[in-house]
Amino acid sequence: MKLLGRKAGPPLDDRLAALAEAADLAEGRLGAAAIDRARDVVDRAGVRRSLSVEHTAVALAGATGSGKSSLFNALTGTDLAEVGVTRPTTAHAQAALWHPAGAGPLLDWLGVPLRHTVADRAASGLILLDLPDHDSIELSHRLEVDRLVGVVDLLVWVLDPQKYADAAVHERYLRPLARHRDVTVVVLNQIDRLPRRSVSRCLDDLRRLLAADGLWDVPVLGVSARTGEGVAELRAVLDKRVSRRRAWASRLAADAATAAAMLQDSAADGAGSGDHVRQDGVFADRTRTRELARALEQAAAVPVVVRAVAKAHRHRAVAATGWPVTRWMRRLRPDPLRRLRLSGGGDARTSLPAATSVQVAAVELAVRDMGAAAAAGVPEPWATSVRHAARSRTPELADALDRAVATTSLGVSRTPRWWRAAGALQWLLTAAMAAGAVWLAVLFVLDYLLLPRPPTPTLDRVPWPTVLLAGGAVAGVLVALLCRVVAWLGGRRRARRAARALRAAVEQVGNELVIAPTTAELARYGRFVERVAVAGS
């Protein structure tokens, strides 16, 4: 993340809004500590901005014996702070105010009841706080330091030559404030106790330690509260910071960056979601998508339905174009689609066989693989949420697939025109056959009754009644056989169209119940990364 105060970044309002959104996005995905810290910064920023921005709360913090209270007295020109050497004397924070008008609500919010007005008008807007010792043997003192260090506008760390390298102050306070360089000043007090040649060496060593803490360019001043050396320079630094009236905003921006870093660290470093989702929101891993679609097709009995479409087409074609003499027998057989309660576009549940255990396992494996592939570029613990999102709606798959099959138009309701033509031809041939049969029957009766027979026309030497009877029967059977061949080809064509429609419906179910939740979680993570980057910039 970029450090504050060096390059122009987004406005403070944008950073805080981004931090608040990032915390909301991380809810239930990351640890509560990082989320609570981010929300605390946002809430605190709202309160601080509503208070006086004409005043700057500057805290003097240090260890026991660092001369912090003596420096407080030197800066205020008073003897307000009780001075001790080896034991903590400051139990509660106290404030010295220059131009106190309007500072009351701010001090109330800071929880500093001890307040003193300084007559000097040079430091307009300065509120100087003398804090308890951060290494006090009293727990309440340490808690008070921690509380105020977290909310004041500007921090002045007072160190002494004996303990400026103490790991406690560096690890507990200075290092966590690496992003607060713009609101931090470090003072090496009691330089009058050092040989003159050792002062610059101690200051250089202190700067080296601060650089290791991430505070490589904060002001580092050598001061002696007892002799007054360096006090004027420190006062000038404070006056300059206070006169800008922006320390409070810099502090809030640094807090936002630190909270954003905690969120980022809680989410770890990941590749993001860009590898999985296109800009149009489509999941880009086509291999996993196809595997999921194939597993869902098997679980939805799509092959069974496709075969039923082909059979139903042939069944209905035979019923419409078959030889009328035997056609009625076809009606005794159940329609394959109606048996499955598939009428091609209805909304009732089907009678398809339930998915087998093998098919269910294949779907679960495909869903897990999809989730694992999606989470591959996302760090833990967010990756767990991505995998969970992929599985979150799997209990709905069975019903959704059944509805998708039931409501898909299979293209079997339209009757081909050639069926009517073939059916009419069959009835014509049947009529010819019947006419020949009747004709022959009349001739038989006339012969039986020894009545004179009318002349019977012939085709070549075959009587026309016989031609009509035999020819109609043979032609009807041949037409029926030809129609069966054509119906078989048409059934295959309709089955292919139905397969495409069913696959599209099944893919839609997979998109809605598996891919869409996964994509939404990836998009949420991507938005989180973007918001954290804005908050920490």
Image (cartoon, rainbow, N blue to C red):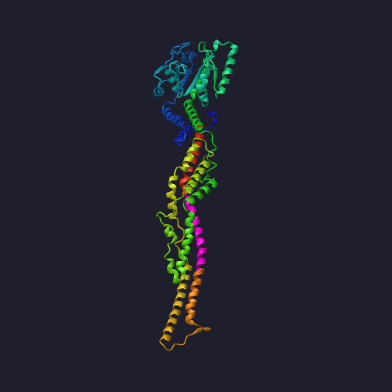
The structure residue drawn at horizontal position 50% and vertical position 74%, both measured from the top left corner, is 475
Q: Nearer the viewer, residue 38 or 298?
A: 298
Residue 333 spot, x, y in % from top left: 43, 63
Q: Is residue 507 magenta?
A: yes
Relative to 453, residue 129 above or below? above
Say left or right for 340 vs 159: left
Residue 451 spot, x, y in % from top left: 41, 88
Q: Quadrant of residue 105?
A: top left
Q: Is residue 339 magenta?
A: no
Relative to 46, residue 498 above or below? below
Residue 370 spot, x, y in % from top left: 51, 44
Q: Nearer the viewer, residue 324 or 423?
A: 324
Residue 441 visible? yes
Residue 287 spot, x, y in % from top left: 55, 47
Say left or right for 167 vs 94: right
Q: Nearer the viewer, residue 499 or 327?
A: 327
The structure residue drawn at horizontal position 55% and vertical position 19%, both measured from the top left corner, is 220
Magenta segment main secondary structure: helix
Q: Where does the N terminus fall, quadrant-wise?
A: top right
Relative to 245, residue 189 above or below? above
Relative to 99, residue 456 above or below? below
Exactly how many numbered labels are in the figure? Answer: 0
Span highlighted in magenta in the image = 483-508
Residue 94 visible? no
